[in-house]
Every structure is written in structure tokens, then in C-alpha cells.
Amino acid sequence: MTVEEAAEALSLPLFRLEGLLERGTVAERDGYLRFKKSVAGKERGTAYFEEAGDVVRGFPKIRRILMLDPGVPNRFEGEVVVEEKMNGYNVRIARAGSETVALTRGGVRCPYTEHWVHRLMGEEAFSDLPELVICGEMVGPDNPYVVSDAYGVESVQFFVFDVRRKGSNEPLPVDERRELVEGYGLSGVRELARVGAGETDEIREIVEDLDSRGREGVVMKDPAMDLDPVKYTTSSGNCKDLRYAFRYFQEYGADFIYPRAVREGFQAVEFEADMDERANRLGRAILEPLAETAVAGRKGERILEPVSVRVFDLSVVEEFERHLRSTGVDAIFREPEELDDGSYRVRIDRVRQGTDDKTANLLAGGFW
């Protein structure tokens, strides 16, 4: 890979890219460069593919509001599209030369994701639309990153929530994106409503309904996508995240935990919630998983995170195991289970070593 060609494709001065590579802000991996954080006008997860000379921009961060009123009318005018925010992992799919690549939020190619992308989507859309990047959420119970069974998905499904132009990262308008997604037989996130910017009571009712069903939240968008979207999370979503973080307490810091607790406080006020009920929900989300971890440690059990993958080709499991190890993830892969449709489900125990070690130390009387 020549740094000069990469710098030109990324529209960066050569000295700037060389500095980013030297500091590790941009990393080289398997024939492509990826931005590990947002810098130099490029989003985190931006990738440059050497052989194809293609740049796939990272997905822009969507800002969050904690108060629907006045948060929504402060940011939008006229109509607002309310779409469901799904609980999975962010994937961008694009053409890089003759290949279809699937990139996680951090710009890493994932062999398991690409296996499912080819099964769920085929090649037609990418052959026809080489200058577009399809952005979506991979959800379902056979998800090795974010497990969720809240959507009635049998295994894994990809839901498109955005389509962007490869070079400029400009998003397609909502209706144009939906027409394209439906035209190629793809699944899209649900549109829940179109409301006036001041109709926050209707958005609140949508959030309460999603919350009652254990769903993640909403993303609010300008139909033309001229304004940046904003997102809002349900109490259920906040507490699920906290429950997960406190189960593996040594892996997550204050930057993950603190904002979710703050969201709960502001939402409780705006929704005029029963404070006893909210406090009970929040307290249980913190205390119960910590106690479960301590009990497991006291029994001498390792602190493991169980997940599963489902594939139609066992070589993908081998590739995925290598992929996890290359990204520093320690995991125990169980024997494959053959299913009736000819696919295989493989149970994986992800080793949460930090929490495992810290739990053992604390139970032995160690210092916090």
C-alpha cells in the first residue's frame, strides 16, 4: 500500500496521514486502512481499500436528546419522521472494487457479518449501486456482539436505516431511501410516525409503547435529511445497557454507565414517572447483575458471556474465531450443532477476563 495514493484518495496531506499512521490513529489491517477515531474531517470507522482505491466513510455520530420537549422543536421545523432505533450492531455495506465488504462501526471487516450479508442481500444491489453505502443494524439472537430477541427475528436479520453516497457521505432523503430498500427486497427499520416538530406528546406515546415491549428507542429525522437526526432511548433500553455493564463491571467505565443513569433521571421527570417504580427498576439493573457475578465467582465459575453464531458454512466459524483473536477477544468455541435446514449453530463463551480476575481478587479480600 502506498501512503501517497491513500492520502490522495482520502483528500489528506501526505504528512498528515503519515502522522496519523505513526500515532496509530489510522491502522493498517488486511489490505485496508481504518480510522480508529474521528479526525482530519473523517469519521471514526472510515476505511480506505488499497486494491480498489475506494474510500468508505464512517457513519456519523447521531446526537442524543434527553428531553423530547423542547429537544425536538428546538432542532426541527415542519415534519419529523420517527423511526425505530433497533438494538444490534451498526454495519455499513459497500462495494470496494469487485468485493462487497461489511464494516462494523469501527471500520473492521467481520467475516460473520459478510457471510450473512451475502445470504440476506445477495449482490444485485451492490452491482447496481457501487457509489452507495447501505447502513443498517444487524439484530437477532445469533448475534455475537449484541444479543437481542426483542424483534421476533429467528436468527440474524439486517435492517437498513440509512443509505449514503460513498464519496461525500451525504444521506439520501428518507423516502428515496425507503423506495430503494423496498425495490431491492431489503428490510428497513420501521417508520413509526410522521409528526409536526411540536407534537412531542405523540412521540412520547410511541416511546412509552416501545418501552413496554422492551425496545430500544427512536431516531427522529428530517424527511429531506438536510438536518442531522437525533435519537432518544427508552428506560428499558437504558436499564438493559446498565444490567449488561454491571454484569461485566470491570469491562465498562463511567463513560458508559454514567450517561445512562443521567438519561433515566431526566426521562423520569419529563414522563412524570412513578419514582418508586423507576428507582426499583434502575436499582435492580445495577444490583442484580453485580450480585450474579459475585455469586458465580464465589462458586469458582469463570465470568463468561454466552453468545451464538449460525452459519451455513463451517469455514466461516474458523474465520470468525481468527477475527476475534486478531481483535484481542478471548473466546471459547463449542462444538457446532447441525440444524434441520443444513445450517450450524455454534455456542461461544466470550471470556470477560477483567471482570473474572477482579471478582476473584475482591472475593479473596483484595482492595478495590
Image (spheres, grey):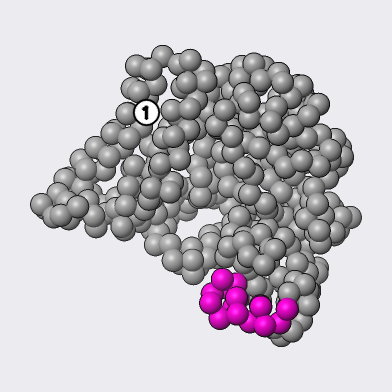
Q: Which residues are magenta?
A: 13-28
Q: Is residue 14 magenta?
A: yes
Residue 165 screen position, x and y as percent: 82, 55
Q: Secondary structure at mark 1?
A: helix
Q: Can residue 175 be seen here?
A: yes
Residue 54 screen position, x and y as percent: 78, 69
Left or right relative to 299: residue 45: right
Residue sitting at 28 percent across and 34 percent down?
287
* Res 137 quadrant in image: top right
Q: Tell which of 340 and 328 is nearer to you.
A: 328
Give the crowd class for mark 1: few <14, some 14-19, many >=20 residues within 10 Å. many
Instruction: Name the residue tied to disc 1.
Output: 282
Q: Tell me the chief SS of the magenta region.
A: helix
Residue sitting at 75 percent across and 71 percent down?
10
Residue sitting at 38 percent across and 17 percent down?
275
Number of numbered discs on residues: 1
| 95 shown above or below 290 | below
* Res 231 quadrant in image: top right
Q: Tell which of 118 and 58 is nearer to you.
A: 58
Left or right relative to 319: residue 18: right
Residue sitting at 24 percent across and 57 percent down?
357
Residue 163 screen position, x and y as percent: 78, 47
Q: Is residue 133 magenta?
A: no
Left or right relative to 302: residue 338: right
Amino acid of disc 1: Leu
Quadrant where the image shows the N terminus? bottom right
Q: Can residue 122 be seen here?
A: no
Residue 73 screen position, x and y as percent: 70, 27
Residue found at the very far right of the displayed protein? 128
| 322 shown above or below 163 | below
